[in-house]
Amino acid sequence: MKYKITVFIVFLGLTLHSQTPQDSLPKGTTQLDEIVVSGTLKPVKRLENAVPVEIITSTFLKQNPTSNLVDALQNANGLRPQNNCNVCNTFDIRINGMEGAYTMVTIDGMPIVSALGTVYGLSGIPTSMIERIEVVKGPASSLYGSEAVAGLLNIITKKPENHKRFTGNFFTTSWWEHNVDLGYRLGSKKSGNGLLGVNYVHAQNRVDENRDNFTDVALQHRIALFGKWNFKRKSGKAFQWVSRYLYEDRWGGQMQWNSSFRGGDQVYGESIYTSRYEFLGLYELPTTEKIKLQYSWIGHNQNSVYGNSVYIAQQNIGFVQALWDKQIGNHSLLTGSAYRYQFYNDNTPATAQSNHMHIGSFFVQDDWTWSAKTGALLGMRYDYNSAHGSILTPRIAFKWKPASNAVMRFNLGTGFRVVNLFTEDHQALSGARDVILAESLRPETSYNANWNYLHKWSTTEAGTFVIEASTWLTYFTNRILPDYDTNPNAIIYKNLDGDMRMWGSGLQGDWISPFGITASLGFNLYRPTVRQEGREFQPLFAERYGANWSIAFTPRNSKWTLDYTGNLTGPMRLPLLGPLDPRREYSLPFSIQNIQLTYKGGHHFEIYGGVKNLLNWTPNRGNPFLIARANDPFDQNVQFDSNGMALPTPDNPFGLTFDPTYAYGPNQGIRGFIGIRFHWD
């Protein structure tokens, strides 16, 4: 492995990017006047918006090239990829310490109404087609519904007319992971313009650096097709269609596993076949009033085995929404009505019969301008769920601009989430623990308060600075927390008999110098607390603090750019199998750092390369092992007492069963990478 990295570094010395200083901004630091849509579902300048919206530019995504947006967002402030499985290595994105199922993903403002959005919704869009990503932190359920409890990721793709005729991006790593992105612009002046994109990932190299006879990273074949078409209408009104298809064959397990062992009890493997399609649309009615229709149809089919446990599931979601945008004096009104149909079925006892759910919604929002410096946003949403009845989610926000280059905001809101356990929690399926549903799960409800202050200033000598500070509190009732503690051989799911609080505060600073340096630094403190039955404790997989940074340097009149990015994650509580389990109950702080050098060789191409995970950190540091009983994944040599508890024996001195749920960080150590981007106009 070290030899492979050395080869990569030597090659970098021969062909090593650059962008102009304006292009190499780490985030939207100078874009405070840019129009955003995510916070209010209508175009508003960032500094005029009552809801804080952070912009992540396409250049930021280039600073740490990855095969999916989940990994690309690891250095964004307040966002963290979470490894949900030590065997199959599925990830999602946490916002402000909250699980990925609480984050909604939209493409060009059109919602992917599925709690799997941050697992599969962030894969397969070529980064060359992404204009920016808008991030809203905090509940947005009053506008977006069930999944928008922690926040929102809105992926804004490029307008076809702004995209090059043909683009390509290829990179590979010293772990022999290969990624190909291709994009093509098509269309005509009469019918409109469109984009076609292909993403292909090939990773078939088995690596076992920690010597437990399990793959450190799941192997995969993935292909994703992306299409977008903007129809040209005489009226100039919008008509847009987006479609995406993803197929993934992923497996992880014992090093000697192959497909002939799939579903058997001889060699352990977790094999997941995923087929997912998405159709999203936007149509503006040909009326004098501003009325838009949004609609989507999403299908998700999964055929998977976890050892000798088979899980086959199908999910279909249909969605349609009408929006009416109306200006009346100093009131900017938005009203809407939505309908959502959800079908879900799997082969587990939890869904002995297929599940059909209908949700009807109505919402109204008033963006009320009091003066040039002050304003408020008031909103209310009503949902009727066929399984759970009526749900109200109000929202209120205040804005004050003490100066033209500063804004202070205060937001209050509520959120709700209807849980579909088996599509959202891979830990319920992986390993040998029994899954126990202690009750019929009710919708989760959250209450959130958020304060935010942003200030920008510039000097001729030092450049431009942006400082943003936030503090927030999220309070949950009916929260569903997997209980790993009551029974080490089971995961118990039920609504929390108590409450959960997530308090946090963050600080973000950005700097654009006049001499080729751009830098970004963010830091967040979290205090997650669960109160239940008279005791108070930290929930699992919730970190205490986090930091991120990025520095880019482009010498004047140079074709070279150097990027250094990194993040720091604080301790989190992890699931143990009992009092004798020798693994750490709390993880040690860890940092993932990357360096990249890019050379812009001409108008049509650039070559980049570098090293990921410079510190060679992996989660087995400070632990005797990660996967419990990796040598006996089917518990054939485990002895149990009359209550079903594992007994300590000479072969099993800690009284453990096979369990891969002790997962929290990426299992990949240091590795080199190299790639090339190119385009034709």
Image (cartoon, rainbow, N blue to C red):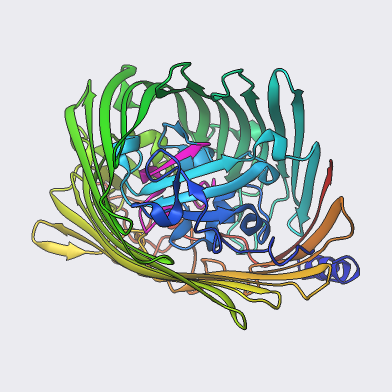
Q: Is residue 244 left or right of residue 369?
A: right
Q: How many marks?
A: 0
Residue 642 seen in this snapshot: no
Q: Is residue 247 left or right of residue 264?
A: right
Left/right placement of residue 109 relative to residue 2 reads: left
Compared with 386, 571 (above or below) is: below
Residue at image position (37%, 26%) is 323
Residue 93 magenta-drawn? yes
In this picture, residue 313 sits left or right of residue 272: left
Rendered image quadrant of residue 608: bottom right
Quarter of the picture holding the C terminus: top right
Q: Position of residue 208 (x, y in %)?
A: 65, 58
Front residue of 84/411: it is: 411
Give 367 or 615, whichever is nearer the viewer.
367
Image position, residue 545 (x, y; %): 38, 70
Can you give x and y, in whole percent of width and height, for residue 255 in the image? Answer: 65, 49
Q: Farthest residue to the left: give it.
A: 534
Magenta stretch: includes residue 419: no
Nearest to the observer: residue 652 or residue 182: 182
Q: At 53% across and 38% down in the image, what residue appears?
A: 120
In this rendering, the answer to whether 517 lies above or below 644 is: below
Kindly identify the residue that appears in the image at 30 percent across and 27 percent down: 350
Which residue, as the protein is rendered here, is positioned at the far bottom?
A: 461
Q: Residue at x 76, y 27 (%)?
A: 186
- Looking at the image, which is closer to me, 468 or 126? 468
Split into 4 quadrants, where in the image is the N terminus?
bottom right
Q: Which residues are magenta?
A: 85-108
Q: Position of residue 572 (x, y in %)?
A: 37, 66
Q: Farthest residue toward the front?
A: 329
Q: Is residue 5 visible?
A: yes
Compared with residue 498, is residue 121 higher up or lower down, i.e. above or below? above
